[in-house]
Image: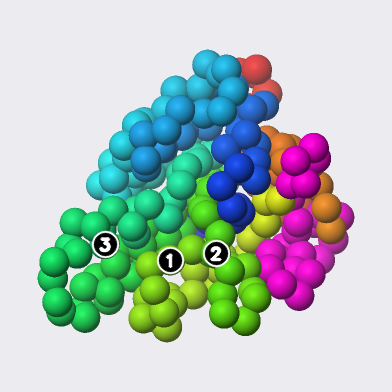
Amino acid sequence: MIMGMPVFVIGFSGSGKSASLRNFQPDEVGVFSVAGKRLPFQSPLKIAMNSSYQTIETALQRNSLRAYVIDDSQYLLAFDSFRRAKESSYSKFTDYAVAFYQLLDVIKHTSPDTIVYLLHHAEETDRGMIKAKTIGKMLDNQLVLEGLCEIVLYAETDGKKYQFLTQSNGFTTAKSPMGMFPLEIDNDLKAVDARIREFYHMQPIIEEEKK
């Protein structure tokens, strides 16, 4: 069964994840800001501020668009952790994993032409690997986020050039299907979206006559 597609864009703060939305038009994408942050550029894009699991999942179930962005999706995990910080039970970590897994499941039950981009902070492990940030090893043992999707882009910058890595260099969890992208691409999420749709023969982000 072909379903909607989650795509992770991971990177450290300031690496150009949010800036990659700069070429989208308001009728092309729905943007959820979990932390209530504005975009780092002037834009007519409408943003659902302080979005929760419920806000995001309700919109995805309506599925009125073909592209969505969850900005700073790791804060869904972090804010759950803050709310339950005084609980001593280890079962709360399972609850965190289940809640995030259920979000990915909602994404996968959208239409076959829907792509949801999860802009997610990165973290470095004790072994020097860069991966999607979670809230501890106990959660990592239950839920490997990158393992639940086909495409993981890694955002990086040298302060002048901003780009996405599309395959692992041995130190990141970046991955994409063979032949989809070159190793390094511009951090332009709209161009990424167009290429994914071309590769998988998905419908365009909006119908031609609406442009």
Rendered view: 27 above or below 19: above
Question: Which comes before the other along the chain, label 2 or label 3?
Answer: 3
Instruction: Find disc 1 in the rendering and name its residue.
Output: 134
Query: Separation of disc 1 and disc 2 at Cα?
Result: 8 Å
Query: Separation of disc 1 and disc 3 at Cα?
Result: 10 Å
Rendered view: 146 above or below 50: below
Q: In percent of the image, x 42 and y 33: which residue is there?
A: 37
Image position, residue 42 (x, y; %): 57, 17
Q: Is residue 168 magenta?
A: yes
Quadrant of residue 141 within the rendered picture:
bottom left
Q: Secondary structure at mark 1?
A: loop
Please say if the residues under marks 1 and 2 sit with CB atoms less than 8 Å apart.
yes
Q: In percent of the image, x 19 and y 56: which residue is there?
A: 83
Looking at the rendered structure, the kind of residue marked 1 is Thr
Q: Which residues are magenta?
A: 157-182
Image position, residue 211 (x, y; %): 65, 17
Image position, residue 21 (x, y; %): 61, 33
Instruction: Find disc 2 in the rendering and name its residue.
Output: 123
Please say if the residues under marks 2 and 3 sit with CB atoms less than 8 Å apart.
no
Q: Main secondary structure of the magenta part?
A: loop
Q: Residues within 10 Å of mark 2 (few under 14, many from 20)?
A: some
Please say if the residues under marks 1 and 3 sit with CB atoms less than 8 Å apart.
no
Q: In the figure, is residue 86 to the left or right of 148?
A: left
The reply to whether residue 197 is visible in this rendering is no
Q: In percent of the image, x 61 and y 54: which residue is there?
A: 11
Quadrant of residue 97 within the rendered picture:
bottom left
Instruction: Find disc 3 in the rendering and name its residue.
Output: 81
Q: Is residue 133 magenta?
A: no
Image position, residue 78 (x, y; %): 33, 57
Query: What's the mark number on residue 150?
Result: none
Looking at the rendered structure, the kind of residue marked 3 is Ser
Looking at the rendered structure, the kind of residue marked 2 is Glu
